[in-house]
Amino acid sequence: MTRPFRLFIVAGEASGDALGARFVARLREVLGARPLELSGVGGEALIAEGLHSVFPQEDIAVMGFGPVVARLPLLLRRMSDAARAAAAFAPDLLLTIDSPDFSLRVAKKVRRLSPHVPIAHWVCPSVWAWRQGRARRMKPHVDRILALLPFEPAALERLGGPQTVYVGHPLIERLDAYRPGPAETARRNDTQSPTILILPGSRRSEIRHLLPPFGEAVALVAERLPGARFVLPAVPRLVEAITQLAADWRVKPEIVTSEAAKLAAFREARAALAASGTVTLELALAQVPTVAAYRGAAWEAALARRLVKLPSVILPNLIIGENVVPEFIQDEASPRALADAVLAAISGGPARERQLDGFARVEQSMRSAGPSPAANAVAAALALVPDRGG
């Protein structure tokens, strides 16, 4: 009788849960007739794939300094619970996904309890940007990192971290959803009544700092382009806060909350004004010229300047090694500067063309791993398992 393949997964939040479910689906294809036993920590997507979650994912799905401190005793207890459950399960492979402050501590405990269990971690922590010493500290208890960004393997090697494999980014599988059809192309080409995306971030602190200058910049753009349409995609939990902060805007944005409405706006957009986060990569792959901004508390900015040792924090810029997306930080992110940069991105001049040329190179680099990140992740993780035949 064929012995089941035993996989223990730790996915601390919804995005990791979705990645984990794709990993499991692909792993089943690779295993063929060999049974698969799952245990670990996950949400609805992984549970639907047959995962027995040793405790609710909601126990550890927290973001932000305050919420983490408030729940710290539970988080520490859940780290130990997950590690003990993994050791007792005796898996052929431990896969931790994102949420590095939690999942990598679990990996460290499992390595101590069960030294021979292979451990892979999917989604490289941003050690190339800040707290670079984490790379070397991961090496004793992570056998392989599965990276979403093409520059990460070289960065981890340079920093003395674990072996890292670029497996591709899930966005590559969804490019068609971001690319305009004929009618949307006509809308995207409209320079007099353009659709402009407003993306102030997904954290309350981001929107609190960025929405006031964004609102003034929108008004300045509208003075020049009275027919412009401003669309602000928002996650449902932030709609109330965004609506309140945008209430005194001279030109009101169209706030949309569904994924379908967001993607439709991406396909039509001529330009975007965005927080300097991961959404800039979405915009690059959607071929939407972007103006990126960051504003935070003065102490946060000072700390970031000390910790982040990069020529840019914009992912498309980092991928191609060239600052094609303009970024405005703290006082530089004035309404006039943002508005002027947005107007330059809307026009058909060199600023816009430079971004579009850069975005083509971003796409080429992102596609270099092939069409299926999940298939690549499974192959890279299974290469760690000495007995794959059962």
Image: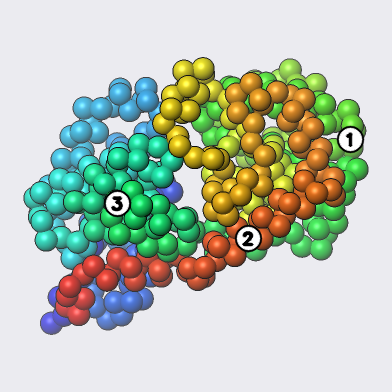
- Of the residues under marks 2 and 1, which one precedes in the sequence? 1
Quick one: label 3 or label 1, which is nearer the N terminus? 3
Q: Nearer the viewer, mark 2 or mark 1?
A: 2
- Residue positioned 70% across, 23% down in the render: 334
Task: For residue 40, say whether it is visible.
Answer: no
Residue type beneath disc 3:
Gly
Q: Residue at x 19, y 51 (%)?
A: 140
For disc 1, the marked residue is 225
Q: Compare residues 141 and 209 and report the one nearer the observer.
A: 141
Q: Amino acid at mark 1?
A: Leu
Sequence order check: which comes first, mark 2 or mark 3?
A: 3
Which type of secondary structure does the marked residue at label 2 adopt?
A: helix
Q: Which residue is mark 2?
A: 361
x and y, in percent, of residue 313 in the image: 53, 40
| C-beta proximity under 8 Å, tags 2 and 3 | no
In the figure, 124 relative to 71: above or below? below
Image quarter of the C terminus: bottom left
Disc 2 residue type (three-letter)? Arg
In the rendering, at what x and y percent does residue 148 appear?
A: 45, 56
In the depicted structure, whether residue 320 falls above or below residue 245 = below
Q: Residues within 10 Å of mark 1 (few under 14, many from 20)?
A: some
Tell me: 77 left or right of 103: left
Residue 190 visible within the image: yes
Q: Is residue 111 above or below residue 200?
A: below
